[in-house]
């Protein structure tokens, strides 16, 4: 694996290798000494064209626990604001000898361009691009789902190691149109055999969704009652979608959104007993998710954050450790 | 100023409009003789051009060219852009108004017109802005531009849509006074805020904000009804969707005086190319679906779409070597247009070379009201604005090798059929043996003749 740009590029074997490697990484994280020598001498650059402290520190922790040197490069100035161009930034990182570049960018496709334009040799790991993809988020979501639910089928590892997600049902609720989390999850969950239903107000479903490998619904209550999802993933609603500003409001009011698409105590009670509640964070409590739902025993939201580090360790390991120049190339 | 190069050419065994072979003599700026091969004597000193198998067309006329000067000479100048035009077989181009300053006054249009005349590669006909500064708030001085030395007949805010319906109505009405036409860039602005590519299956997947077909179609539908209501003529720029073709077809069936253009790129490229995130393929209106490509080809073949216009839009490398979302819209087209039309329409059997002459020369000349000088028949006494094409040649497009100052061709690396062998502007070769002739400055008599002498032919000549 040279790059990790989109979950749509992952075969089932690739995805399972990532998840199983993440399980090994997670096991090392319960040790007193969490740090592994695996990527000693390798340089990982966190290149962030968009603020995201959560994602950046997760990648930073992952890289450091593998003993990589980490450089944080915040390039808030974009070509739009006449700051340094993507190309010049890439050439700079190339000159610095970056082995892997973790890139977060406001522009869909920027990681793809970094990987394919011939500006640098490093492996490129997409940490979220525009409204396109956020593959490590989908991987940590799948990892979390598997850990909680795949073991239930019996026979295998209690944490689901080695297993796919066949037969599991995942409802993804909210602003699908602008969500890289939704796009990444639909592709990956499908590859792993799960069924997906997207639940959104019609204004927040992309035109063209009919070709996606999933169902769509405008009715959260009916989806919970009739389809009986094993996991419900609530998407964050951005404040700018609510006002009549540039693109116009996508729904009449935050109140109405919550009434039809928010996960509250009543809807929580409709879920099957084993079902889990997920959110990629940061949450808007009281909007897409109520405090009762966020703090309930079904919520695995904090665990998602912890699993994020393990999944990102796995991704960095698989991107970089194929190279014999890495020391201690084992776990 | 001296004339270099001969002024008399004998084109041997060429096929006018793809028809039977003939010998054609160009002398004194006009077609001096047309006869069966071998029947025409070469005048003393004439240059012989062996045109066996080559198609002779009236010089191409582009109704939609961005020459970027004044303001963005780093992307293109009138000189470099018209040189590219000549290389592509054009003898006249209409230079769009979205320069800096905007071509919204007599002064700016005359400046562009003079730069074109001085460059000498093609006749440059400036397009005037409809509204001051393209701001869409009040009409520019359309009359002053029409009555300037540049004799503007085509008005457009291209790059932006005249979306205010009352302003559009006024513009349509006002230009009737001088037989002008409003060329509309049909794009409902509210439906396309932040839009990056065609809205559909591909945009949904790759996460780029969608530019829906309805944003084009809604404006075209409104405009044809406005044109009908006030009895004006309307020109639709770069129509790109199947729905737009249907609306124009319906409007024409009602007798509405509307003409429409399609670009070469919309005849062949689709939104699948956005998957590369290569901003070379970012253009406005965006590349659409394969079904739209088929619809615009059918519309061009059946006459619903009147013309092919390039929307040649050069951009600097800095404006394209960046994120898709930050990149400029537009692609070059002057040097590939004829080849794309050949590939998509002629080689597929959907159009003849006579049809090519119609959609790339006769009709655009008529719409731009330059039909007295361009888009003329290949006949004795007609102005010798001609292009000679070798349809059997093929070439691989190389952006760096083109005459345009910018490299943003979407056809780079693609093999295209056809090659412009020669272009003649009032009998003088601007291209010969496939090479642009630089430094062959027009003699004073021939310079800008088609424009300066324009009033001899009333503006309405050639009107439909
Ligand atoms: Zn336009």
Image (cartoon, coloured by chain):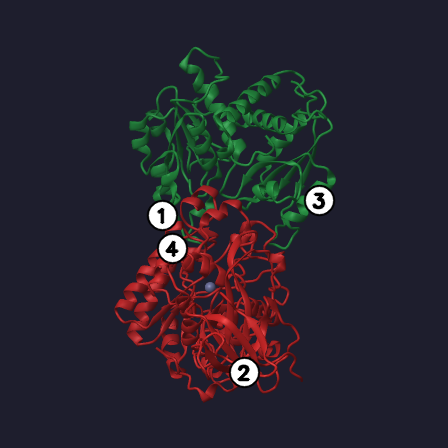
Chain colours: A green, B red
Q: Earlier in the sequence, mark 4 or mark 2?
A: 2
Cα–Cα gap, marks 2 and 3: 60 Å
Which residue is tagged 2? B27
Q: Secondary structure at mark 1?
A: loop
Which residue is tagged 4? B213
Cα–Cα gap, marks 4 and 3: 41 Å
Question: In the rendering, at what x and y percent does residue B433 appear?
Answer: 59, 67
Labels 4, 3: one chain = no
Question: In the rendering, at what x and y percent does residue B204 appear?
Answer: 43, 44
Tell which subunit mark 3 falls on: A
Q: Residues within 10 Å of mark 2 (few under 14, many from 20)?
A: many
Q: Which mark is residue A92?
A: 3
Which residue is tagged 1? A252
Tell whether A311 sits left or right of A181. Answer: right
Labels 4, 2: one chain = yes
Cα–Cα gap, marks 1 and 2: 72 Å
């Amino acid at each position: 694996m040279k790059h990790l740009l989109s979950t749509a590029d992952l075969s089932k074997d690739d995805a399972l290798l990532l998840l199983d490697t993440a399980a090994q990484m997670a096991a090392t994280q319960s040790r007193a000494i969490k740090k592994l020598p695996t990527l000693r001498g390798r340089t990982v650059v966190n290149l962030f064209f968009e603020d995201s402290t959560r994602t950046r520190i997760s990648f930073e922790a992952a890289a450091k626990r593998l003993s990589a040197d980490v450089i944080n490069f915040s390039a808030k100035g974009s070509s739009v604001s006449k700051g340094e161009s993507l190309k010049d930034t890439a050439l700079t990182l190339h000159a610095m000898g970056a082995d892997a570049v973790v890139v977060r960018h406001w522009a869909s496709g920027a990681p793809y361009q970094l990987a394919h334009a011939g500006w640098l040799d490093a492996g490129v790991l997409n940490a979220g691009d525009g409204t396109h993809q956020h593959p490590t988020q989908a991987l940590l979501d799948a990892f979390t789902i598997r850990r909680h639910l795949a073991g239930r089928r019996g026979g295998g590892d209690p944490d689901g190691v080695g297993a796919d997600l066949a037969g599991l049902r995942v409802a993804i609720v909210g602003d699908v149109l602008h969500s890289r989390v939704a796009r990444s999850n639909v592709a990956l969950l499908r590859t792993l055999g799960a069924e997906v239903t997207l639940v959104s107000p019609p204004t927040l479903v992309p035109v063209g969704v009919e070709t996606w490998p999933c169902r769509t619904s405008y009715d959260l209550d009916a989806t919970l009652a009739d389809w009986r999802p094993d996991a419900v993933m609530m998407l964050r609603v951005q404040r700018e979608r609510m006002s009549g500003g540039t693109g116009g409001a996508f729904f009449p009011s935050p109140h109405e959104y919550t009434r039809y698409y928010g996960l509250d105590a009543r809807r929580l009670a409709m879920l099957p007993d084993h079902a889990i509640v997920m959110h990629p964070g940061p949450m808007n409590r009281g909007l897409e998710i109520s405090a009762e739902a966020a703090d309930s025993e079904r919520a695995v939201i904090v665990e998602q954050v912890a699993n994020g580090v393990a999944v990102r360790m796995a991704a960095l390991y698989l991107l970089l450790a194929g190279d014999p120049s890495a020391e201690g190339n084992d776990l | 100023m001296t004339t270099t190069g001969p002024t008399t050419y004998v084109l041997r065994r060429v096929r006018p409009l793809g028809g039977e072979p003939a010998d054609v003599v160009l002398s004194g700026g006009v077609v001096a003789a047309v006869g069966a091969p071998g029947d025409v004597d070469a005048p003393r000193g004439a240059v012989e051009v062996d045109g066996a198998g080559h198609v002779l067309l009236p010089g191409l006329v582009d109704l939609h060219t961005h020459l970027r000067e004044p303001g963005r000479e780093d992307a293109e100048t009138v000189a470099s852009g018209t040189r590219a035009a000549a290389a592509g077989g054009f003898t006249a181009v209409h230079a769009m108004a979205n320069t800096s300053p905007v071509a919204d006054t007599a002064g700016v249009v005359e400046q562009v017109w003079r730069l074109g005349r001085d460059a000498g590669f093609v006749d440059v006909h400036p397009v005037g802005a409809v509204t001051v500064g393209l701001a869409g708030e009040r009409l520019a001085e359309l009359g002053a531009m029409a009555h300037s030395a540049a004799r503007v007949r085509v008005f457009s805010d291209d790059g932006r849509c005249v979306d205010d319906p009352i302003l559009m109505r006024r513009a349509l009405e006002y230009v009737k006074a001088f037989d002008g036409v409003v060329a509309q860039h049909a794009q409902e602005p509210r439906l396309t805020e932040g839009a990056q590519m065609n809205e559909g299956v591909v945009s949904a997947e790759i996460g780029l904000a969608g530019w829906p077909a309805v944003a084009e179609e809604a404006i075209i539908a409104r405009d044809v009804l406005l044109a009908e209501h006030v009895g004006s003529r309307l020109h639709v720029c770069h129509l790109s969707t199947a729905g737009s073709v249907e609306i124009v077809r319906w409007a024409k069936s009602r007798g509405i005086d509307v003409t429409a253009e399609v670009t070469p790129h919309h005849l062949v490229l689709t939104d699948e190319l956005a998957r590369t995130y290569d901003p070379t393929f970012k253009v406005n209106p965006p590349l659409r679906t394969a079904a739209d490509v088929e619809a615009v080809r059918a519309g061009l073949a059946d006459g619903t779409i009147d013309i092919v216009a390039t929307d040649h839009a050069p951009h600097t490398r800095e404006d394209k070597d960046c994120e898709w979302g930050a990149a400029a819209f537009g692609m070059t087209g002057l040097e590939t247009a004829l080849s794309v039309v050949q590939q998509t329409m002629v080689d597929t059997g959907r159009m003849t070379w006579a049809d090519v002459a119609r959609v790339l020369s006769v009709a655009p000349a008529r719409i731009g009201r330059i039909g007295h000088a361009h888009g003329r028949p290949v006949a004795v006494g007609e102005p010798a604005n001609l292009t000679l094409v070798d349809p059997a040649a093929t070439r691989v497009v190389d952006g760096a090798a083109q005459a345009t100052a910018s490299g943003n061709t979407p056809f780079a690396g693609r093999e295209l059929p056809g090659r412009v062998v020669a272009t003649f502007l009032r009998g003088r070769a601007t291209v010969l043996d496939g090479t642009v002739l630089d430094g062959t400055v027009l003699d004073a008599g021939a310079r800008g003749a088609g424009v300066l002498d324009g009033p001899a032919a009333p503006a309405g000549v050639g009107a439909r």
